[in-house]
Image: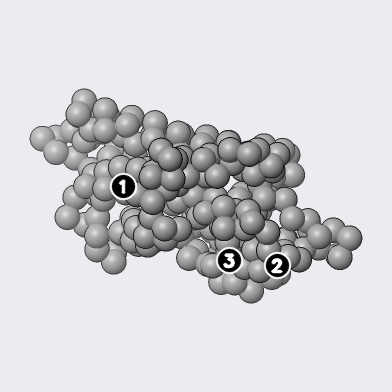
Amino acid sequence: MTLARTDEQRMLAETLDATLARGGNNWVTAIEETGLDTLGVAEEDGGLGQNLRDAAVVAAALGRANAEFPWAEHWAAKRAAATDATAEMLTVLHCAEIVGLCRTMLRDAALFSRERRQFGVSIASFQVLRHRMADMAMILEQADAITSAAIDALDSADPHSARFVSAARVVCDDAARIVGEGAVQIHGAMGLTAELNVGGYFRRARALMQGDGGARTHLSRYAA
């Protein structure tokens, strides 16, 4: 994962993944009991620090589990004081959650394509479907990489950080649409039923796509 760069961040992601997989998909278990409630509070004040990348690692993990927690808003509220970059940070954390959602949707689509059979063979063997999943994987990695770049720009106070954030928001919007629609269609008529998780993941992704001013606003800001 591009977002988790250090061993500590990878361990953070793995720990939260394991907690959520065990059914700890409530705020108390996933956030408070793991100590993440103090992420966003400065270390000198007894917290875990205000590292944006750490917060993005958590957002991506919550996305992979579709926990639907208001993590970005919680983390921003925990910071001692709002800054001009707070809105940009919120957008980046929403991008990280979209990346997490897309990663699970792609994984589930790939697994299902190997199980679903037509004409006596797995649909994963169909060339057109393999090309589509390759496109889904490519846009996902682009979204992951540009979100990581936006974090670097904000952390370094790059004067062009707002453009990086807008670029990330636009690419993540594309990823949510391409990966989400692809995953639902690969699952066939079951894709949007309550029986399968993929529909819930796509609905959460679409909800995030409507926030932060929308991709069109960010595209206009980037062009300007």
On the question of residue 157 being in view, the answer is yes
Residue at the front extreme of this rendering: 224
Q: Is residue 35 left or right of residue 72?
A: right
Where residue 30 sits, quadrant-wise, is bottom right
Q: Secondary structure at mark 2?
A: helix
x and y percentages locating residue 18 in the rendered image: 60, 55
Quadrant (top left/top right/bottom left/bottom right) for the N terminus: top right
Q: Give the mark, 1 or 2, whose residue is nearer the N terminus.
A: 2
Q: Which residue is mark 1?
A: 177
Where residue 151 sits, quadrant-wise, is top right
Q: Specify the color scheme.
A: one colour
Dot 2 crowding, Cα within 10 Å, few <14, some 14–19, many 20+ = some
Q: Give the mark, 1 or 3, whose residue is nearer the N terminus.
A: 3
Q: Alpha carbon of mark 1 to alpha carbon of mark 2: how far?
A: 31 Å
Front-most of 22 and 78? Answer: 78
Quadrant (top left/top right/bottom left/bottom right) for the C terminus: top left
Q: Which residue is mark 2?
A: 78
Check residue 73 in the rendering and tell me which mark sits there, or answer none.
Answer: 3
x and y percentages locating residue 200 in the rendered image: 35, 62
Q: Residue at x 50, y 64 (%)?
A: 67
Front-most of 32 and 224? Answer: 224
